[in-house]
Image: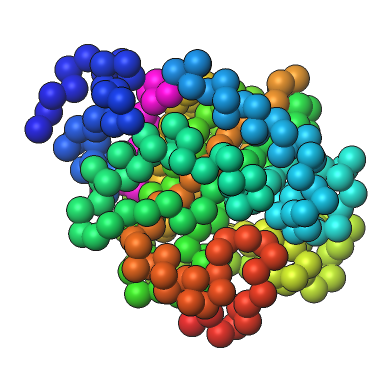
């Protein structure tokens, strides 16, 4: 059903529903990503801004341990040296955030994309790049390279722009079509400057990185505040540092099949960096 003649967001919203077209679903399934404009209004974003700034400024640090971290640097990096600030699973720490307007609208989109089962929210993450931090990069990876092996891997990861995001401040980059590669690329712990030769693992750092090759042609996905990008679990993606004088702010929310989430939880996996897992065992 191709009803979305006027593509502006407000014509596609009806309450908690944001209507997407069959060609957008096809685009997502074929190329592994999608960009949707004006998903939330500025009024709706204001409440999310409050919680985002609350977490990113470290107000819940006392209870978050490794869930408040810099994913571009090893755990234990002093907070004042953070460049890429991450707050994992925020509504686990502040349940008032759960069931917010972003969740409800993203749920409506995930359910339109996924018909083979029930799409449910698996985890959330706040991600902020400080201004003028060239090192605030998100190393190229496939999300599945990070996660325990599950029978069904279907995932739609939503990134809501809370600030405009562009090439200068390190917007998301994807390599279209890599979602169709049969094998996952090899993911290795990221070596850090000054730590060459030091063994990094899932206890010392969250960051894994793949080697890209000459054929890999990333494209940038610049977005405006209120827009959303969606990427699947196999597409190669990442982002560069922030060379601008403004923050880049993103609210990530991932949806997976309800049975997959049950399987993850049975392994003790919630996507919190504080989960205790035997990674050799769960990666399969
Ligand atoms: O938005 C970014 O810079 C990267 C986020 C990312 O890699 C992810 O959500 O999987």
Residue furthest bottom as drawn: 281
* In this rendering, position of residue 236 left or right of residue 166: left
Q: In the rendered view of the protein, which quadrant contains the N terminus?
A: top left
Q: Position of residue 129 (x, y in %)?
A: 70, 35
Residue at position x 24%, y 60% in the image: 117
Q: Residue at x 80, y 48 (%)?
A: 61
Color style of the picture: rainbow
Q: Position of residue 45 (x, y in %)?
A: 53, 23
Q: Is residue 23 above or below residue 183?
A: above
Q: Nearer the viewer, residue 272 or 153?
A: 272
Q: Is residue 8 visible?
A: yes
Please tell me which residue lies in front, 252 or 207. 252
Q: Quadrant of residue 7?
A: top left
In the image, is residue 16 above or below residue 202? above
Residue occupying image coordinates x 67% and y 74%:
276
In reply to whether residue 153 is colored magenta, the answer given is: no
Q: Position of residue 207 (x, y in %)?
A: 67, 59
In the rendered structure, which segment of residues is drawn in magenta?
Answer: 30-40
Residue at the image point whose x is 41% and y is 70% from the top = 262
Is residue 178 visible to us here? no
Looking at the rendering, which quadrant does residue 3 occupy? Answer: top left
**Nearer to me, 45 or 114:** 45
Residue at the front extreme?
96
- 176 vs 209, left or right, is left
Question: Is residue 104 positioned above or below 184 on the image?
Answer: above
x, y percentage for residue 105?
A: 37, 34
Does the stretch in magenta take in 35? yes
Report the number of discs. Answer: 0
């Amino acid at each position: 059903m191709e009803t979305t003649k006027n593509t502006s967001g407000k014509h596609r919203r009806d309450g908690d529903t944001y209507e997407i077209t069959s060609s957008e679903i096809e685009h997502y399934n074929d190329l592994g990503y999608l960009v949707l404009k004006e998903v939330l209004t500025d009024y709706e974003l204001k409440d999310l801004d409050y919680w985002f700034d609350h977490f990113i400024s470290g107000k819940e640090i006392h209870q978050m341990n490794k869930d408040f971290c810099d994913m571009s640097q090893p755990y234990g990096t002093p907070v004042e040296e953070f460049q890429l600030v991450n707050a994992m699973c925020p509504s686990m720490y502040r349940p008032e955030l759960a069931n917010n307007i972003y969740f409800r609208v993203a749920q409506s989109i995930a359910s339109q994309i996924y018909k083979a089962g029930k799409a449910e929210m698996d985890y959330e993450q706040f991600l902020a790049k400080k201004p003028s931090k060239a090192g605030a990069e998100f190393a190229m990876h496939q999300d599945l390279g990070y996660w325990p092996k599950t029978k069904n891997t279907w995932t739609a990861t939503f990134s809501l722009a809370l600030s405009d995001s562009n090439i200068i401040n390190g917007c998301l980059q994807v390599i279209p079509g890599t979602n169709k590669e049969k094998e996952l690329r090899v993911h290795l712990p990221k070596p850090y400057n000054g730590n060459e030769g030091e063994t990094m693992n899932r206890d010392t750092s969250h960051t894994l990185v793949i080697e890209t090759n000459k054929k890999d042609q990333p494209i940038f996905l610049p977005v405006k505040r209120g827009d959303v990008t969606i990427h699947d679990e196999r597409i190669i993606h990442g982002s560069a540092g922030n060379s601008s004088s403004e923050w880049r702010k993103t609210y990530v929310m991932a949806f997976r099949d309800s049975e997959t989430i049950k399987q993850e939880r049975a392994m003790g996996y919630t996507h919190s960096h504080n989960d205790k897992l035997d990674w050799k065992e769960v990666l399969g």
